[in-house]
Image: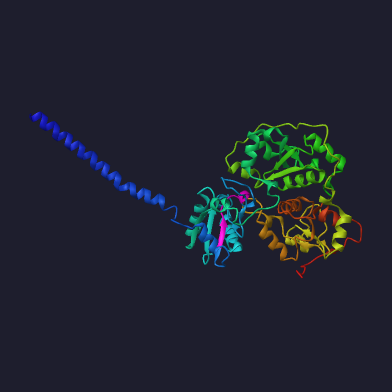
Amino acid sequence: MKSKNLAFILILLFSLLILTACGKNTSTEPEIAQEIEGESQEIKRISTEELKTNLLKEDWIIVDTRINDAFNGWKLDGVKRGGHIQGATDFAANWLKVEDKDRETKLEKVLAEKGIIAEKNIVLYDANGKDAQTVADYLAKKGFENLYIYDVKEWAADDSLPMESYENYHMLVPASWVNDLIKNNNNGAPYKIFEVSWGEVSEEYNSGHIPGSVHINTDEVEEGPVWNRKSVEELEKFALNNGITSDTTVILYGGDSMAAFRVAVILKYMGVEDISVINGGYNAWVDAGYEVEIKSNEKSPVTSFGVKAPVNANYIVDLPDAKEILLDKENSVLVDIRSWDEHIGETSGYSYISGKGRPAGSLWGRDMEAYRNIDGTMRSATEILKMWQEWNISPEQKLSFFCGTGWRAAEVLFYADVMGLQNISLYDGGWNEWSADADTENSIEIGEPSKK
């Protein structure tokens, strides 16, 4: 009997020890949970009716926090309609992850330029239940209080509610679309993926590239000393050597996609119907966590381009055309996509270009960097048009973009095409040709121009 009592007492003591230990654990668990919850602020959710009521009020601002591709027009994360809520601005959650030593300074500038300020009521929307909360937490830490979260799938499901997308948004593709295309082999239709950069050997390509992609050296499409595009005959050989026909789906990208846009513009000029550039370049692919390939892929030539090139001859213009554009100032503009210092003649911008200044009568369209978000994606059309308006550049005019040798201007031309603008072109020779030509009629201006 004593032994049974002793055993019972021991069991009771052991049980008390366990309960005490468990009690200690349970007392700390709420603290841990509370700390984790503290990383995300509790943000009020707004209904569709409330959003409709406040949509056009000056003290409210609607912010799309999804990736840039969704804002442009792609149907991502299960939305019924692509694009953004009419009147919305953008501030993507993934901008907060960009590796840049000046990221915070740049983001502060972006917030100010977009009018995302603490004095306003700010509706942050997404379609994945994550992006809006991420941006809300970021803004809350900055002292923003009037924050609301909304699921854009509700808005997109109602066809009566206004949404906007770019007419040719499909020309800029998300990494997810490219990944799907590779998986389904483009449903059996011919396609090619190219990494584009200068040089026979690309360090970027060799260090890792999208599976199946082939390297294009920009020397394949242009040549010095002016660095204009090559002849139509040479460009056709380039296309055939790379396995490109007029009906091939062509996807281009790069570590910095400027070279990809250069080749994209030339291929459209030639007559390739389905050309796209990965929005955000190779970084967008890597950031999405998709597979990267190291082995080199060889070119696969074809024997016929399919159409007589160039199909879109007016997509790229030369010196005589540029002069005509300058003569018709009411209806056309030669748009300078160089830095301010290049535009006013402080520098030529190139070691091999001696001349400084700008073609007389050309207008400054801002440097190419002004057309990119912090993650290298396309800046919103609203902001691009606002930049142009400051220099009396209208999307209704015939616009021909130029830079030093065609790379920067090609990217901006491509964005203008994505926006759906008509009567647009690349002045291929740019400042390199204009400043070097012996023709004395190539008048040049130096100094700060008037916006009027």
What's the image's color scheme?
rainbow
Image side of residue 167 versus residue 317, left or right: left
Q: Is residue 368 left or right of residue 266?
A: left
For residue 323, what is the image quadrant? bottom right
Q: Give coordinates of residue 219: x percent, y percent.
A: 79, 42
Whether 64 is among the magenta residues is: yes
Provide residue 28's location: percent of width, then percent of height: 32, 47
Looking at this view, name the residue that lies furthest to the front. 160
Looking at the rendered image, the quarter that the N terminus falls into is top left
Question: Camera-side residue: 444 or 346?
Answer: 444
The region drawn magenta spans: 61-70
Q: Is residue 293 in view from this perspective?
A: no
Residue 260 drawn at (x, y percent): 73, 45
Quadrant of residue 179 in the image? top right
- In front here: 175 or 205? 175
Task: Return the x and y of residue 398 as percentages of the image width and height.
Answer: 80, 59
Residue shown at the point (57%, 40%) measured from the top left: 289
Q: Nearer the viewer, residue 162 or 319?
A: 162
- Quadrant in the picture for the C terminus: bottom right
Residue sticking out furthest to the left:
1
* Rendered position, 149 above or below 330: above
